[in-house]
Amino acid sequence: MKNLELLAPAGDLEKLKIAVLYGADAVYLGGRQFSLRAGAANFDDKEIAEGIEFAHRHNVKVYVAVNIYAHNPDLETLPAYLQNLARAGADGVIASDPGVIDIILKSQPGLPVHLSTQANTTNWASAAFWKRQGLQRVVLARNYPWKKLKKSAPGWISNWRPSFTGPCVCPIPAAVYSATL
């Protein structure tokens, strides 16, 4: 079992292919809606499907950021978007809004959900809460020290698999930790 997953950002289809071909274990991307990846070109539905198919041919996972803080109108079209992601074969979604997470878990129960760094998790009790909700990974608040969380946590956290990820390919001080629950 790998102890580390190299997770790279993919701002568009070309960048996804580069990340895949240069050794990423997984990529994360945002669609043109439901994503806070505003600085990226992002993907339309067809490009998401094409990117997932390309990555999977190379045994690379694809996580889709669904990390907006939703307003009521967003919730009306979210289930159809999630269905498209599941149909395309997304390996999981990254979310932060509790309402969005609830809709994901109810409408696509087989689609793994990872908690975004946007949720600012800084303690084991919050991580435990998200675990009880059914999330599979928590990305801690930016620059939050993994050892600090683990030090005061109950035993099950010792089974977490920490990994680096970040908003871009960046030096270690700007990286954040994530942990698989």
Image (tube, rainbow, N blue to C red):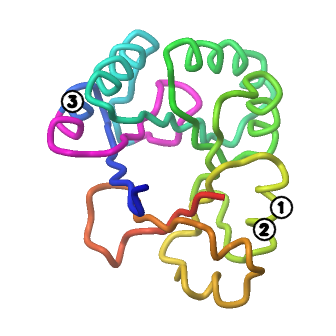
> What amino acid is found at the position of numbered circle 3 in the picture?
Lys
Give whichever of discs 3 and 2 has the lower sequence position: 3
- Which image quarter is the N terminus in? bottom left
Q: Position of residue 20 (x, y in %)?
A: 23, 36
Query: What residue do we see at 66% from left, 49% from top?
Result: 136
Which element is circle 1 on? helix
Which element is circle 3 on? helix
Query: What residue do we see at 77% from left, 56% from top?
Result: 131
Image-based side of 22 in relation to 77, left or right:
left
For label 3, the residue is 17
Which element is circle 2 on? helix
In space, the residues marked 2 and 1 are separated at their CA atoms by 5 Å
Residue 129's disc is 1
Q: Position of residue 162 (x, y in %)?
A: 50, 68
In space, the residues marked 3 and 2 are separated at their CA atoms by 35 Å
Give whichever of discs 1 and 3 has the lower sequence position: 3
For label 2, the residue is 126
In the rendered structure, which segment of residues is drawn in magenta?
Answer: 18-38
Q: Position of residue 34 (x, y in %)?
A: 59, 31
Image-based side of 66 in relation to 56, left or right:
right
Rendered view: 94 above or below 156? above
Total numbered circles: 3
Residue 7's disc is none
Around disc 2, counting alpha carbons within 10 Å, would you say few (fewer than 14), some (14 to 19), or many (20 or more)?
Answer: some
Image-based side of 92 in relation to 98, left or right:
left
Rendered view: 147 above or below 180? below
> What amino acid is found at the position of numbered circle 2 in the picture?
Ser
- Which image quarter is the C terminus in? bottom right
Res 146 → quadrant: bottom right
Q: Are marks 2 and 1 in contact (CB under 8 Å)?
A: yes
